Image (cartoon, grey):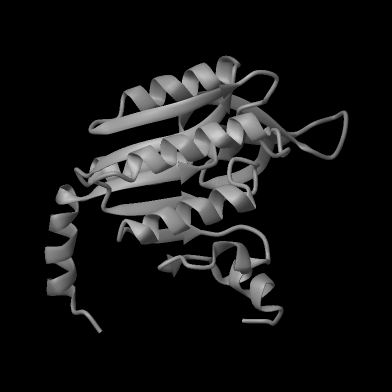
Amino acid sequence: MIDKFELSALIGRLAEARVVAVGDLMLDRFVEGVVDRISPEAPIPVFSMRRESSMLGGVGNVLRNLSALGADSELIAAIGNDAAGDEVAMLVAEEDRVRSHLIRVAGRQTTIKTRFVAGNQQILRADRETMAPLSEKDQAMVLEAALSALDGGGVLVLSDYGKGTLDDHTIQAAIEAARTAGVGVLVDPSGADYARYQGATLMTPNRDEAARAAGMAL
């Protein structure tokens, strides 16, 4: 087991890293407010909005963490040609040491997760998203950008939330190309069939995800 002093040294070296991050990009919105009464129309709380904020989610969260640690990164993702997509693109542009390849898909809803928070309690989450896979043309553009970015990359991160950016072919082609280039592959998996990630260096499911994939309680 690595001790905390060795870990501290490794964290410091993350500023030297170059990471290629591919996956589902989202817009995380937070609406903060207060609840001080129940509606007379139905037995539900009346939420008084006070403040709203937005940040990158999904593979965008990976990107934000890498930027905070000083690493260089390349982001490849598909977003809708909509207002939420514009906001996501603007937030990506604000991150330091990031190159982005955002594929705009007409008619696709950029994923938005809106969380309503009263005090320290989240009382509701409302999602807007398109779950359908990308077209063959758009998948090819994602893969082409990923393979191009691997040249000189240190690690490939596949952030799969099951929103359609990563299909089986794109995942396997990217993993095979990374292995050929001697690049490690980290996967944040989705679904129960982990065979689609065969060849990855490391996967990071949470406990519930691992239980679904294993078909047993953990």
Question: How many labels were placed on the picture?
Answer: 0
Please provide percent x and percent y for residue 102: 47, 27
Q: Is residue 17 left or right of residue 164?
A: left
Q: Nearer the viewer, residue 183 or 52?
A: 183
Q: Nearer the viewer, residue 214 or 173?
A: 173
Q: Is residue 181 left or right of residue 4?
A: right
> Does residue 52 appear in this view?
no
Q: Quadrant of residue 218?
A: bottom right
Please provide percent x and percent y for residue 108: 67, 25
Q: Quadrant of the N terminus?
A: bottom left
> Does residue 155 appear in this view?
yes
Please provide percent x and percent y for residue 106: 65, 18
Please provide percent x and percent y for residue 95: 30, 30
Q: Is residue 182 left or right of residue 79?
A: left
Q: Quadrant of residue 126?
A: top right
Residue at position x 50%, y 40% in the image: 143
Above or below, comparing residue 102 to residue 175 in the picture: above
Above or below, comparing residue 71 to residue 33 in the picture: below
Q: Is residue 190 left or right of residue 32?
A: right
- In the displayed image of the protein, which residue is found farthest to the right? 41
Above or below, comparing residue 212 to residue 64 in the picture: below
Residue at position x 34%, y 39% in the image: 149
Residue at position x 15%, y 50% in the image: 16
Residue at position x 59%, y 40% in the image: 165
Above or below, comparing residue 123 to residue 109 in the picture: below
